[in-house]
Amino acid sequence: MSRSHQEGKNHKVNTILSTRLKEKLEKIQQILNTLTEESSKGTLIVVEGRKDQEALRYLEITGPILTAKTGGKTFTETVQEIEKTQPRKAILLLDFDRRGREGTKRLKQELEKTKIAPNLKFWQDLSALLGRDVQCVESLPAYIQTLRRKAAVL
């Protein structure tokens, strides 16, 4: 195979990769923009811990964020804390690992009992898009930066 033929194949592969990375980045950004809009309306977002909360703040999400697993809080205390804020709905954005999935499912069930509508759409969309690349919310800003860097290089 000639050198120019190989370079042409490499360029084609890089173009495809670059396009996929850019599309993925755009989809993540669209989800985060919608999340920011919901948050700015006062919709409560529930995350696991302080680092997750800090990651969302870094991503310029300014509305109310409640941490579910800080200060030795029990699951019941977390639900009670959510109830105190009297939201009509709450966005559940726990981690994407097994514990996060279990916590999300359990919180969803508990909130439904209290007549608070749990919103899992953001969690589901991000989880599907991120796959195994990101396991926790706190890793999201670094992942986005990495995608931007890779998309720019290719």
Image (cartoon, grey):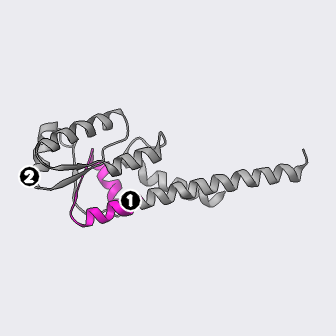
Quarter assignment of residue 98: top left
The answer to which of 102 and 68 lies nearer the viewer is 102
Residue 133: where, in percent of width, then height?
A: 49, 42
What's the residue at 31%, 34% (across, down)?
99
Relative side of 45 to 96, left or right: left
Residue 50 is situated, as x and y percent measured from the top left of the image, at 27, 49
Q: Position of residue 21 (x, y in %)?
A: 57, 54
- Give the residue number, with chain letter if any, for mark 1: 32
CA distance separating discs 2 and 1? 26 Å
Q: Mark 2 = which residue?
A: 84
Task: Tell me the magenta residue range.
Answer: 31-59
Corner quadrant of residue 108: top left
- Visible residue check, residue 78: no
Q: Position of residue 43 (x, y in %)?
A: 22, 60
Q: Which mark is residue 46?
A: none
Is residue 99 a member of the stretch shown in magenta?
Answer: no
Q: Main secondary structure of the magenta part?
A: helix
Tag 1: amino acid: Leu
The structure residue drawn at horizontal position 64% and vertical position 52%, both measured from the top left corner, is 17
Quadrant of the drawing holding the N terminus? top right
